[in-house]
Amino acid sequence: MRPVRDALMLLVACAVVLVAASPAGAQKPKAERPTYTLGEKWVRNDGAFDLIRIDNDLYIFSSGESREVHLTKDLMVAKVVRYGRVLLEFDPPPKLAWPLEVGKRGKSKSTWRSPYSYGPSEFKGTATWKVEAYEDVETPAGTFKAFRIAFVIEGTGEREARYQDRPKYYGYWSKSIPGGPPALEQDKREFEFWYAPELRQLVKADSKNLGSIDFQVVAVDRPEAVSLQVALLEPKDQARVTMEEVEVTGKVTTGKWVERITVTLNGEEVAAFDERAKPQKERPLSLPLKLREGKNVLIVTALEAGGETRQEARTLFYDKPAPPAPAPPPAPVLKPAIPAPPPAVAATPAPAPPSAPAKPPEQPVAPPPSPARPVKPPEPELPKVAPAPAPAVPPTVIAKPAPPSVPAPAAPAPAPPPVAALPPLQVTVSSPRDQARVEQETVALAGLVSGGKGISRVAITLNGVEVSRQQERAPQPALAVNLPLKLREGQNILVITATEADGRIHQEVRTVHYEKLVPLTVAFRYPQDGAQVAQESSVVAAVVTSSKGVAKVSVLLNGKEIHQQAERAPQRSLLVTVPVTLRDGPNVLAVSASEPDGTLRQEIRTVIYDKPKEVAVAVPPPPPPAPVHDRWAVVIGAGRYESPDIPKLRYTVPDAEAIYQTLIGPGGFKKEHVLLLTDKTEKKPTLRNVRWALGTFLSRSAKKDDTVVIFFAGHGAPEVDPRGIERDGLAKYLVPIDADPDDLYSTALPMDELQTIFARIEAERVVAFLDACYSGAAGGRTFTSKRTRASHVDDLFLERLTRSKGRAIVTASRTTEVSIELPELGHGIFTYYLVQGLKGAADLNRDGIVMLQELYEYVEQEVSKKSRAVGGNQHPVMKGELEGVLPLMRVK
């Protein structure tokens, strides 16, 4: 029986192993529901869609051509709109249960509507969905792993009577074919869509009878992922210090999670931080270090989730101060000489008279003193600063017996010959040089370690990973270091660590930048050459790359330029996405790019638009609704600037928050129509986000009859403008939090660009309130770079910005003044009275409405008065012209 039992146990064990190793035992792929913020961009074959607002738990994406796609927070389609007309709608939208897993399914009741489709235009039914597979899906943007979700809505036979006899219509949004519609079940609609967890978005949709819902992602436009970075503010590299202890300050940032940070000094770990228990994307650094005399090498190594490492190194020199010289001894204080009897002497061996030597010295008594033997006073020429030697007397024989003679000391033994001191250990690196920039992936390390008490070990690390180690049993006087190194793109930290025979460690660091050589290339992502499309709305998507930087890109449609962008700071890679409207028949698309040196490159594609045939004429659609006068706003507060050379502002964020609350509160602005960017919001006031808010959010949201309000609180700054356009020779900028004060041209928003932004906004009434100044003077919301000296600043740029009708700018001060912040108000003076005016204090005629002109008059008067009261000089200025009066707020 025992052999049988053993065999059965063996079979069971094998079965368990097979089950564990089988794919069925593997963990199923799963995707959590994503969340989006304003500015999310999906580049599809039917347009480039930006998330312009989040309204009633719906994500509203707009392509800027009056085309919108409304998605639920579960990413189910709620509505598709074009030119204000609903092409397709689910009411209520079907519900999708997250997280996604293969096999998951669900159902819900919904009503489907499509006024411009063939077949029933509306029916009620049951919507069912199922996650069919996790598979590769091909799109023009690439191949991605995605969940395929099948969706079906089947009608119950119930529909509104007004749609019973509606004639069929086959428009461009349906999948009609010449000669008639495809076969169709009357009350059934089906489609599939794919969700890619890697991209956090839907990448494809395909339907059997819902043409308006079909799309493919043709490019991925996302901000570059925040790579792992170690930024050390102090100490500076190659610094020489005279203090033994220094403070290390800085931070580690990443787009993932920081797992571990280690700090080494001269090859020995002095601090380690395990961040896995509380992962975070930004970890500040602050710790003291005790240096050794001479050269010190500090290395900070960060590890992020996924195993990526990043290092930053500093070389410091501690010059130990010399000990202070000993103070000279104090000069002795001479006491008055007291006469003393001279010692008894005799010319013959006979003893001296007994009375002389036996008589003790007389003690001082009250005057008059008793008579004493006359004593010769001390010579007046004797020195008084140093103890005087005994008075010179003629050589005589002293009565006191002479001490016994001491034999002379023996001559010292001869000293041994001096031993030459050992030369200090040196690590010499001839290649690569520090801060070298190379265009090849592999570089040669050549160096020599010599001196000291003998070298027992040499280790080489690249970006925190050991790539070589030489271990010697017997310490060597010198070791050569020669090996090839494979670099990663960007910054590389090379560390050579040498250990002496007594265990003392020496390090040498080199930083090498690998800049991969990439020729100017234009790569079309969409459309394909010779493609035939059935929709007039499309998009051009291309990636332009160059290691020299891309200076300019233009897009042409049928020989006419429809888009141009010039990069002030040429980028190595640039994604170009431009919506286009095709004409019937062939269309020629061209993308041209140039490098800073003028090198050009152009790629051309031909696309054929087959306009669908209309088989039957539908009942004319109802007239569009009367335009609604809506209001939109972007409110920005920048205070905590990333650069230590830009002064931080205390009240700009409270200013922006006060304006925001006033607009959505008593102002009656819809909350989803007001975009707030501050240091505290999820979307920070960086240059990219400020441009998106002003140039994309407003241009794709505000319509012709709407009103737009822009508010900015932060630094303004001047910089020398070599173009010669400005009379004062200075370009003016609004400064985002990520600006570089010594390169405002590339990192800040030029006031000239506001003219372009104003032109992009369709609304006929745009007002901008700027609580910033441009004088560059100290003490206000302005600064100047070290290379700029602003002696006189004029306001010609404001006049230029407001030449177009319907555009007005109200600034906090004149160009030569500063914008003041007051702790007693908790705000800038300008914003404080701006808020008070909007709340009703500026309703000068008491009609219950605050007009722009009323608001300006009130703010100008109050700000001027308050600034004088605190010893300042600030006068708000308004430039521009609006037709008629502009009501801003209704006073309740």
Image (tube, rainbow, N blue to C red):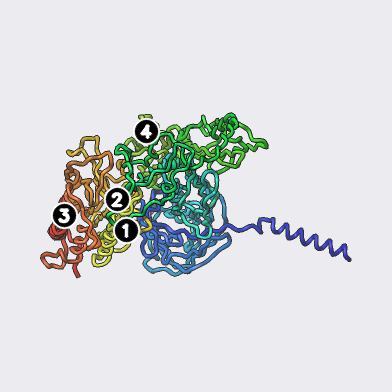
Return the residue nearer the eye: 577 or 843. 843
- The residue tagged 1 is 676
Q: Residue at x 33, y 43 (%)?
A: 375
Q: Is residue 69 above or below residue 515?
A: below
Residue in view at x 30 percent, y 42 percent:
744
Q: CA distance from mark 1 to mark 2?
A: 22 Å
The residue indicated by pointer 4 is 594
What distance separates the C-alpha of mark 4 from that of mark 2?
37 Å
Tag 2 near tag 3, CB within 8 Å:
no
Could you tell which of marks 4 and 3 lies nearer the N-terminus? Answer: 4
Residue at 84 percent of width and 62 percent of height: 6
Q: Which numbered disc, 2 or 3, marks the residue that appears first in the sequence?
A: 2
Residue at disc 3, secondary structure: loop
Amino acid carrying label 1: it is: Leu
User: Which residue is labeled 2 in the image?
Assistant: 647
Amino acid under label 3? Gly
Q: Quadrant of the N terminus?
A: bottom right
Left or right: 48 as drawn, with respect to 495: left
Crowd around label 2: few <14 · some 14–19 · many ≥20 (10 Å):
some
Q: Which residue is mark 3?
A: 872
Give the mark nearer the N terminus: 1 vs 4.
4
Residue 69 point in image, percent of width and height: 39, 56
- Distance in Å between CA atoms under marks 1 and 4: 36 Å
Q: How many marks?
A: 4
Q: Quadrant of residue 608?
A: top left
